[in-house]
Image (cartoon, rainbow, N blue to C red):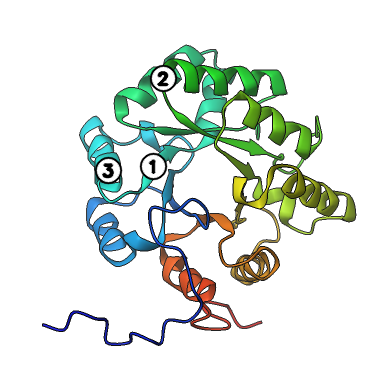
Amino acid sequence: MRESHIFDGLDGRARSGKPRSTGFTMVVDWGMGPARQQDLQVMGAPYFDFVKIAVGLSRLMTNDVLTRKIQSYRSLGIEPFPGGQYLEYAEMYDQLDLYLPACAEAGYRWIEVSDNVAPVSLSWKVDVIKDAVENYGMDVFGEVGKKEGLDHGPSFTEDAKACLDAGAKIILLEAAELVNADAETEKQVEDTVAAVGVERVMFELPGPWIEGVTESVIHKMRRELVDRFGVEVNIGNVMPDDLYSFEAYRRALGVNAGSVPE
């Protein structure tokens, strides 16, 4: 049997392999069944590092389905985590004390701490991050930025530094902030990257839930992020069907890999 790849030498741009310290890709799981998840893992396990079980979908699956889903991802070096909005809803309905114990019991080793929809303070985020890290041994994504229509509190840089100081490993930059960003937002993004390092930031791609976002917008943004920050930029919210085309673009194996004609 041939040991080397048939296309060895035609590898495109150099790219780090797993386990990575940067260049992470995070895929969103909107409730994939076991067969589709297995297909994704067989084809794409080397190319993604994290998977977000979106919003509060962890509650909609049976215990068995959820724990098998989590275990299957983790067996291949892919860390699943529940969407941050689920944590926020727990806070809004005064059920936060149930959230972290449930995440730990389910088998999650990472969580997202965000403030997209709940009217919470930065000190609340800091307290939750510390609780997750110190009392549950979890790793944390600290999200910076707001959904459309919500007022900003501290600057992105202040927010990001506070999350990292509290124990967060990676800063998620909210996708809504990157769509049609004005000069001030662009400056805040640049300042945050300069302050904490691009390797500590994961840029979330937007989705159709944000007004005006089409497939063309998504594909253009992911290309611009790779071109701007390099092949090892951390990118989140990649749709499962886009994983291969995005990895192809990272590696320069297709200049417009996966792009939608305008």
Residue 238 appears left or right of 224: left
- Determine the CA span between mark 3 and mark 1: 9 Å
Above or below, 77 relative to 254: above
In which image quadrant can residue 45 be found? Answer: bottom left
For the residues carrying marks 3 and 2, which lies nearer the camera in this image? 2
Is disc 3 in contact with disc 1, using a CB cutoff of under 8 Å? Answer: yes
Please identify, in this view, whether the residue under mark 3 or under mark 1 is nearer the observer. Answer: 1
Q: Which residue is mark 2?
A: 136
Marks 1, 2: nearer the viewer: 2
Q: Quadrant of the N terminus?
A: bottom left
Measured Cα–Cα span from mark 3 to mark 2: 21 Å
Q: Secondary structure at mark 1?
A: strand
Q: Say if residue 150 shows up in the picture.
A: no
Seen from the viewer's position, the closer of residues 86 and 26 is 26
Q: Position of residue 207 (x, y in %)?
A: 59, 56
Return the x and y of residue 197 as percentages of the image width and height.
Answer: 68, 48
For label 3, count other residues whose C-alpha is less than 10 Å away and answer few (under 14), some (14-19) or many (20+): many
Q: Nearer the viewer, residue 56 or 132?
A: 132
- For label 3, the residue is 69
User: Looking at the image, do the residues carrying marks 3 and 2 touch, with CB atoms under 8 Å apart?
Assistant: no
Left or right: 133 as drawn, with respect to 19:
right
- Please give the residue where the numbered disc 1 appears in the rendered image: 80
Which of the two discs, 1 and 2, labels the residue nearer the N terminus? 1
